[in-house]
Image (cartoon, helix red, strand yellow):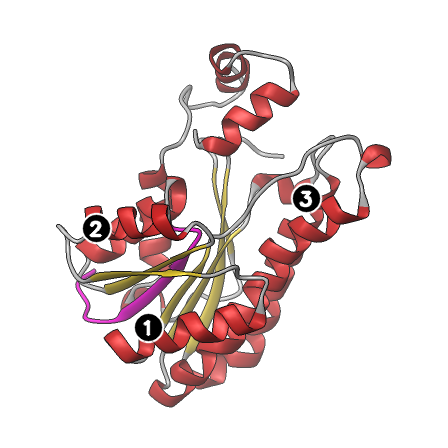
Amino acid sequence: MKTNRVAIVTGAAGGIGEGIAERLARDGCAVALIDVDGDRCAGAAARLGAFGQTMAAQADVSDPQAVANAVDRVVEQFGAPTILVNNAGLARDKPFDQMSLEEWDLVQGVHLRGSFLMSRAVVPYMKAQRWGRIINISSISASGHPERANYCAAKAGVEGFVRSLAVELGPLGITANAVAPGLVVTAMTHATAARRKLSLEDHLADTVSRIPVKRPGTPGDIAHAVAYFASEEAGFVTGQVLTVSGGVIV
């Protein structure tokens, strides 16, 4: 895909988000990286400047005013955004009956409320262009996972959200899809290993043993799927959840 579209990627200071931002920049998009960690986000944008036009904006995606301010900055610098990747996320894993309301609300706020707020802020620009791509990053955990009730519920909500947007926005030339990664080694993987009281190496060995392709995923694997959904060629594909997990079926 080669394009001159303006793309926004949230949670783009590292990991999967940075990988997606790199791919979209390589594909010719002007890419705005948004993250709650402003310094890391600026560093990622500077690195990716080698591949195309990039900018960084600090924002908590669960904060309506911060979202509005960040999108205004993108429009001022690059113009109307027509590709949105809702990738921002975090985990607060623990047994359901030990989970605090704050831990529940925090995870829902970033994943689900954040996807809503970012989409609401960007869709008017897509409507004006009569072209848009919304891609939410879900997870195979949307199907259920022990000690991740808040995360699983948020990811299931993200998938339901894109299905609703697909029906509502399809007549306007806007598609909405989700990518559901399996194991991808990021900072969240380290946290999961710690929760299981395993070293990262032991956690990966145990998890990879159950992956048919016998390796963990990479941010690039997820970025390939996002690039397809963001492309002109995917205009007849909407309301879909693409699992990218090396063959793991939950």
User: Which quadrant of the view contains residue 100?
Assistant: top right
Is disc 1 placed on a helix, strand or loop?
A: helix
The answer to the question of whether label 1 and label 2 lie on touching residues, with beta carbons closer than 8 A, is no
Mark closest to the chain's N terminus, 1 or 2:
2
Is there a contact, CB below 8 Å, between mark 3 and mark 2?
Answer: no
Instruction: Give residue 14's position: percent from left, percent from top.
Output: 37, 42
From what the image shows, is residue 188 above or below residue 61?
above
Can residue 147 be seen in this snapshot? yes
Q: Residues within 10 Å of mark 3 (few under 14, many from 20)?
A: many
The amino acid type found where label 3 is placed reads Cys
Say left or right for 146 vs 188: right
Q: Which residue is mark 3?
A: 152
Q: Which residues are magenta?
A: 1-12
Residue 46 got which mark?
2
Q: CA distance from mark 1 to mark 3?
A: 31 Å
Residue 74's label in the rendered image is 1
Dot 2 falls on a residue whose secondary structure is helix
Q: Seen from this angle, which residue lies furthest right?
A: 97
Q: Residue at the left extreme?
A: 50
Q: Mark 1: which amino acid?
A: Val
Q: What crowding class fits label 2: few (fewer than 14 Cα within 10 Å), some (14-19), or many (20 or more)?
A: some
Left or right position of 119 against 125:
right
| Kind of element beneath mark 3 | helix
Q: On the rendered image, what quadrant is the C terminus found in? A: top right
Q: CA distance from mark 3 to mark 2?
A: 33 Å
What mark, if any, has residue 85 been given in the picture? none
**Depth order, front residue of 171/184:** 184
